[in-house]
Amino acid sequence: MQYKQLDNFPANFLWGASISAYQAEGAFDTDGKLLSIIDKYLHPEDVANFDVASDFYHHYKEDIQLFAELGLKAFRFSIAWTRIINVETQEINEKGLAFYQQVIDECFKQGIEPIVTMYHFDLPYFLEKKGGWKNPETCDAFLTYANVLFEAYGDQVNYWLTINEQNTMILHPGAIGIPENGELPSKKELFQMNHAVLVAQAKTFKLYHELNLKGKIGPAINLTAMYQATASPDDAIAAHNWETLRGWSFLDAAVRGKHNYLFEKYLHDRQWYPTITSEDTLALQEGAPDFIAINYYSTATIAASKNDGSDVSARAGDQQIMLGEEGVYRAAENPYVGKTPYGWVVDPTGLRLTLRKLYDRYNLPILITENGYGAPDKLEEDGTIHDPERITYLTQHIQAIQEAITDGVDVFGYLPWSAIDVVSTHQGFNKRYGFIYVDRTDHELKELKRIKKDSFYWYQQVIARNGLE
Ligand code: BGP
């Protein structure tokens, strides 16, 4: 649909930006923070690790002041579970609680809405040693953690996100690191974990609502619309397979309170179906979100599986690069879209399509919690950073959101990745997304000085105008 005129962004639209604890904070063992899986997992050795990251832990005030100068109306950050509770002794770490209280206070002082992700990939290592999400105790531990957060900040924070990108954790587990023994869980184990996380999430939704807190809570999934490679009906089935398994299966459980039918068949057929208790079934039914958050970077193009041993691509996959699966789908190229320097498809219209499909399916308000352009930005000798590709990328995606809003989709905020440069999940400091440059490299910490990129000044204008020119 083409419109003669696009609707304006709503007056209270949440223009913002995002980070996560482990990718930004550093201070990995400071003030009582315990180790998470991220601190123990194996990561590529030639890039930065997460020990210091952008040192947001020590720079949060300066950073939030910069976000205020940028004009952000909302700032999404995650809380590190390992700063809050010692899951072994159940002791609460007051210093950890105080840190996030300061972050929240600084946000409010600067007129910024804090948006909190409760869990962004960084499971406490102590729980991992006891089986991680395979152990039902992890679900209980998450509920205890949720309770502590709601008690501490529930009367202040208006938007909560339970789990960041559960689908990345389950479908691309290697993207966030490899366990020390070098072995990723089996598919059967992964889908058991998946179910456990969904149950923990549903119970968290229920708990939040029972506490009658003033805000809203939702899941945050990495969502990607799938195109069929040709008009072949088999390609259409394959695209539907993968769109369901990669995206809808996670959201159907979260929103509709039961597992998707095709997903269940897929698991049964492969003998990966998890153990599900009647208590789990009830928990899924009883918890529901108030809104849906999505992280959107790319679309994918899908062909029918050839089922001849060649469907799984030899190239390394990650959260946006589709690998293929025998009997399910095969990754295909799309000549109509671009790519980032890291091979991620650039498809703004795909965002409009993804938003429409998401709204069709669940009819809930949508918050875009990530979207962005990873690039090896360069600090020029005169102290500037020119990132025109990022500006183009974001401009096109904002345009697509405006089109979706004009279509009638209820999108209430846009929080690109990332507010400031952070360590990429597996590509270090070379791959940057921020509006603010952090002066360090993978191998040299330097002074971690904050420098505004061209995109900073551009986004400032967008927010001030409440939209594109
Ligand atoms: C998402 C994650 C983020 C973030 C982003 C960019 O999948 O939620 O944590 O890192 O992708 O990914 P990367 O850092 O791999 O480029």
Image (cartoon, rainbow, N blue to C red):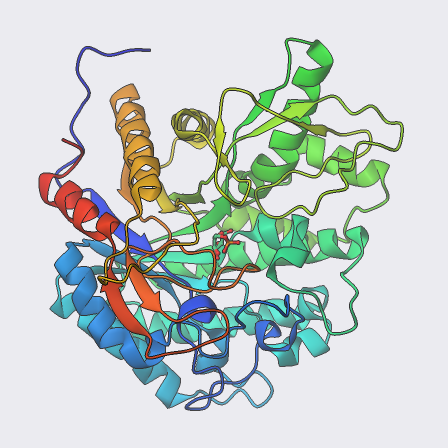
Identity of the residue drawn at 45% across and 76% down: 444
Q: Residue furthest right?
A: 308
Q: Quadrant of the N terminus?
A: top left
Q: Is residue 106 above or below residue 352?
A: below
Circle count: 0
Where residue 32 sits in the image (x, y, percent)? 46, 90
Would you say 349 lies left or right of 328 here? left
Would you say 361 lies left or right of 87 here? left
Where residue 397 sits in the image (x, y, percent)? 33, 33
Q: Quadrant of the C terminus?
A: top left
Q: Residue furthest front?
A: 381
Q: Quadrant of residue 123?
A: bottom right
Where residue 416 sits in the image (x, y, percent)? 34, 48
Please name whichever residue, 94 or 295, is drawn nearer the observer in this view of the structure: 295
Identity of the residue drawn at 60% across and 61% down: 176
Q: Quadrant of residue 263?
A: top right
Please name whichever residue, 330 or 198, is drawn nearer the observer in this view of the structure: 330
Q: Is residue 317 above or below residue 238?
A: below
Res 283 visible: no
Where residue 464 sits in the image (x, y, percent)? 10, 45
Res 361 visible: yes
Identity of the residue drawn at 82% across and 39% down: 268
Please name whichever residue, 206 or 390, is drawn nearer the observer in this view of the structure: 390
Q: Is residue 395 above or below residue 197?
A: above
Would you say 233 lies left or right of 111 here? right
Identity of the residue drawn at 44% across and 73% down: 53
